[in-house]
Amino acid sequence: DQMVIAMRLRDPKVEARANEHFHFSIYRAAGSEELMRIIEHLWLKFGPPLLKVMEEGGDEGESRIRRTAKHHAAIIAALRQRDPEKAAAALQADLTDTSKFYAKLKRAKN
């Protein structure tokens, strides 16, 4: 909810923090220190450049908000159902959609 509100207010810093909190809560629940080290390394490497792209523009408005909310709701539903395959698929869909969004923004800038 915090992320969707931040997206509507066009506040990329709050959006990024809310998204990080959402994802890292799930990753921590996996209970794998090695997984956390890998993800934290990737987050530190790619997070700042992605935030910069978000701050600089791109406006898919409500369609991006709906897609993100849909992906996150699917992740939550799968976790509540204790269905790891569904949760992994929903998480993969979220990350894939997000990467496509960032790639599109990057191309538009160039």
Image: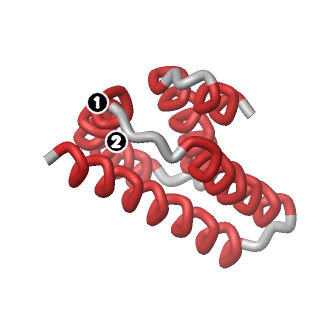
Q: Position of residue 48 (x, y in %)?
A: 28, 31
Q: Position of residue 99 (x, y in %)?
A: 38, 58
In the figure, residue 24 lies in which quadrant?
top right
**Which one is earlier in the sequence, the residue at label 2 or at label 1?**
2
Closer to the camera in the image, 57 or 48 = 57
Q: Please give the name of the residue rendered at 86% of the width and 67% of the height, measured from the top-left corner.
A: 81
Residue linked to disc 2 = 43
Q: Quadrant of the N terminus?
A: top right
Residue linked to disc 1 = 52
Residue 8 drawn above or below residue 68: above
Q: Label 1: few (<14), some or many (≥20) within 10 Å?
A: few
Q: In the rendered view, does 43 fall on the left or right side of 62?
A: left
Q: In the rendered view, does 73 fall on the left or right side of 42?
A: right
Residue type, mark 2 in image: Trp
Q: Please give the name of the residue rendered at 61% of the width and 22% of the height, measured from the top-left corner.
A: 9
Q: Secondary structure at mark 1?
A: helix
Q: In the rendered view, does 8 fall on the left or right side of 58?
A: right
Q: Secondary structure at mark 2?
A: helix
Residue type, mark 1 in image: Lys
Closer to the camera in the image, 63 or 23 = 63
